Amino acid sequence: MKKFLLFLGLLFCSLHFSASAQTTTIKVFDTVLYFDGYANRVDTPLPPPGVIRHRNDLYARKLSTQELQSIGNTLTMNITIKAACDNYDRIGNVNIAFVPKGDTTYSPDSVSRIEIGRYITPFMNKNVSPKQVPYTYTMDNVAYLLRDAALNAEYDIWVELELFGVPYAANTQVAGCAGRNDVFYGSLDFVTSGPTGSQNNNVLIPIAFKESFNNYNANATDTVGKTTRTFTFDVPQNLTDASFFLITSNHGANSGGEEYIRRNHYVYYDGSLIHTYKPGRTSCEPFRQYNTQGNGIYGSSPKSDATWQSFSNWCPGDKIDIRVLNLGPVTAGTHKFMITVPAATFAGGQGNFPLSLYFQGKTSGMLSTKDAQITKSSFSVYPNPAQGAVIVEQKGNLSIKGIRVYDALGRNVLTQTQVNQPKFSFVTTDYASGLYLIHIETKEGTVIEKLQVIK
């Protein structure tokens, strides 16, 4: 695993872009076609101009100078995965690769990369609508990295869209897929707004990129028999604010596998416990609509919240959380990150918790990390699904300051900046049926995301 220090600045994106008065959309990938991940690389048809097909499951494109200069201080990433001839749930991710300046291509394993988003495809039959699924991420912190003057002087910034799929089941189960080796189509846009311009007060330390994490492989744990990983890293100078950005997801579909058992995860920084989490949504029902291929996860009828929580670590058709762990000011020197899942068993020596982690901080000012994760919170959003009205209600110590609602394409369809009351409602008659993301900004300075279905 490589580690390197980057002194950086603001946002990221790629390909042709269109701009309005306040918002710029950069189309990084436009329906690129993925092929059998186990097969030799497909060279025909060629990928779109400017796009490299590293493997059948990995595409990359360099962000142009013009695109990088168009980035403001907000960044939303929209991914759309369209069904071809893979009808199973698969894992995909988005990476930023730091490539030596001027290189026209690169070997992915030979350059430093950070994973900025992870997602799981639904079980999709390409002949049944909806035939595609959207994923939306808000990650303003990445904007700082893409706008950094020193980073852009030394490296070209490439964006990777990765999705591993195989067509074997669909070859016999999906009409029109016999003999085919294409599996999915993928698109990725960056949407940005706000003041542009380079920055030079950021520090980035890539720590782990999709590292194996389990208890049976000596290279995936500190101690065989225990699910614990420790990473040591050096911070070059004092920082006024810093955060870890952590992505993990639990896999192992064998009998008794870790994919189906929710476990407490404990995160330590320099020996102190700073975060505890248990993966999994309250319910996977909001994603049922995208699972158009019959499967044993969703079954034929809706499940209760308790049922989903009894076995589901993630939902086919959903994104995986980016867990933002704010540290506040950090002093220069050597530091340690440790994560442990004491109850994990990895039955039969199978399963894995692929782990990505990077550290980002500011030499002056604060690091904006709002909206970067879906956080369990003391808010209630109901009814779900909703028809007529949606109610957002305070249930704990946090207070509602503002509300923003985004549709499945990442478009802001509602903004209420000053709520100042424990309950807020909005009518749904003006909104199309589908999945929405509700951002709840609190007076305490945090932002909570809630998924909402509108009928």
Image: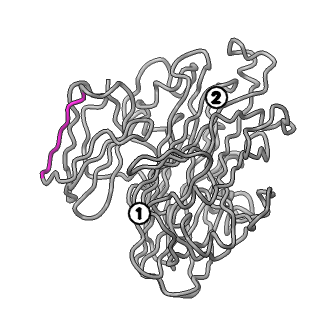
The magenta span reads: 421-428
Residue 335 visible to the viewer: yes
Percent x, y of residue 386:
27, 28
Number of marks in the image? Answer: 2
> In the visual, does 295 lie left or right of 384?
right
Q: CA distance from mark 1 to mark 2?
A: 42 Å
Tell whether position 177 is magenta. Answer: no
Instruction: Farthest residue to the top: give it.
Output: 175
Color scheme of the displayed model: one colour
Residue 342 visible to the viewer: no
Helix, strand or loop under label 1: loop
Quarter-of-image position of residue 451: top left
Kindly indicate whether the residue at mark 2 contacts the one at mark 1 (C-beta within 8 angstroms).
Answer: no
Q: Quadrant of the N terminus?
A: bottom right
Label 1 crowd (10 A; few <14 / some 14-19 / many >=20): few
The residue singled out by tag 2 in the image is: 88
Helix, strand or loop under label 2: loop
Q: Is residue 21 above or below residue 68?
A: above
> In the visual, does 220 lie left or right of 387?
right
Residue in the image at 74% along x and 26% along y: 167
Residue in the image at 38% along x and 51% along y: 22
> In the visual, does 311 lie left or right of 353?
left
Percent x, y of residue 9:
52, 70
Percent x, y of residue 241:
42, 77
Most foreground residue, 107 or 340: 107
Quarter-of-image position of residue 230: bottom right
Quarter-of-image position of residue 176: top right
Q: Amino acid at mark 2?
A: Tyr
Magenta portion: prevailing SS class? strand
Instruction: Farthest residue to the left: give it.
Output: 421
The residue singled out by tag 1 in the image is: 195
